[in-house]
Amino acid sequence: MSRFLSASAVTGAAVAVTVATGLSPVGLASSAAAATSVNYVALGDSYSSGVGAGSYISSSGSCDRSTNAYPEQWADAHSPASFTSVACSGATTSDVLSSQVSALTSSTTLVSITIGGNDAGFSSVMETCVLESDSSCLSAISSAESFIANTLPGRLSTVLQTIHADAPSARVVVLDYPDLYDLSKSNSCIGLSTTKRTALNQGADDLDSVISTAAKNNGDVFADVRGQFSGHEICDSGSWLNSVTIPIGNSYHPTASGQEDGYLPVFSGSAG
């Protein structure tokens, strides 16, 4: 094939693309310009790094960033001017402030974040609920809920205010966590008792409510994934969430499908 196209060939190609997409040449140029003007930084914990989704990026080390994580998938689809993910497995609000917000600049135009679950002791609560009695599980969840109600709101606000200070022009999308279980199918589902599952879902809802309030109080976009995951929770045949797995660190995290079909559409609809 020739390296050079005639003027008529170029014109024909432009017309073909225009007809296929319904966009004028000006519209096509505008869409491309919009995509290439986005400077996107992904912050947060394992739900943003992609733990549980496989295909981990070796250079991310123990942060376990996955090519299947929603930030990477969004960047692949939209080709922003720049993309950086510093999301990291196990991250807390303190970690975001100490080692993640430094990735932000005055040129950053889009930020995503999931945070708060590790502050509330997500891992230790799940361990208690898997290994111990109903009463021990409920006690652990109650302690986490007290922390969520009384301490977490201030921590979340500090994080979001810091993001705005470091990236004043950015659209900040704050995503939450899905409910873990489809309780309507719990009686036929092996594993934890329905008592534990009900309390865990309520704890997740309490956490999501606090995250929603913090986002709205700071003028950010709250992106709720619970509706998207409905019908794809643990106990559903097409679950997008890992149950107890080996390695254990993948447990109760979104699968690759959970990232692609759960988180990605919600983030895409909120990214502007």
Image (cartoon, rainbow, N blue to C red):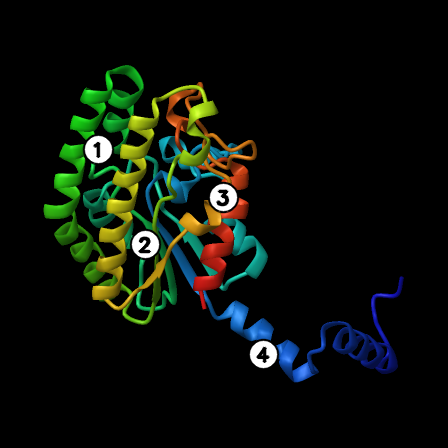
Query: Which residue in the protein does label 2 denote?
Result: 103
Which amino acid, mark 3? Gln
In the rendered image, residue 104, in percent from the top left (x then y), is placed at: 31, 59
Q: Residue at the spot x=41%, y=48% of the render?
A: 226
Image quadrant where residue 19 sits:
bottom right
Amino acid on which disc 1 is placed: Gly
Decide which of tag 4 and tag 1 comes sooner along the chain: 4
Disc 2 or disc 1, which is closer to the eye?
Answer: 1
Spatial distance from mark 3 to mark 1, Cα to Cα?
Answer: 22 Å
For the view shown, which residue lies furthest in the right direction? 1
Disc 3 crowd, CA 10 A, few/some/many (<14, 14-19, 20+): many
Residue where numbered disc 4 is placed: 30
Amino acid type at circle 4 is Ser
Q: CA distance from mark 4 to mark 1?
A: 45 Å
Which image quarter holds the N terminus? bottom right
Q: Nearer the viewer, mark 3 or mark 2?
A: 3
In the image, is residue 92 above or below residue 84? above
Q: Quadrant of the C terminus?
A: bottom left
Q: Position of residue 121 (x, y in %)?
A: 21, 33
Q: Pick the residue in front: 247 or 38.
A: 247
Say which element carries label 1: loop
Few, some or many C-alpha atoms within 10 Å of disc 4 (few <14, some 14-19, many ≥20)? few
| Circle 4: element type | helix
- Whole-number angstrom distance, CA of label 2 to CA of label 1: 26 Å
Is residue 99 visible in this depiction of the protein? yes
Q: Position of residue 260 (x, y in %)?
A: 54, 46
Residue position for label 3: 259
Q: Which residue is mark 1?
A: 121
Closer mark to the observer between disc 4 and disc 2: 4
Of mark 3 and mark 2, the one earlier in the sequence is 2
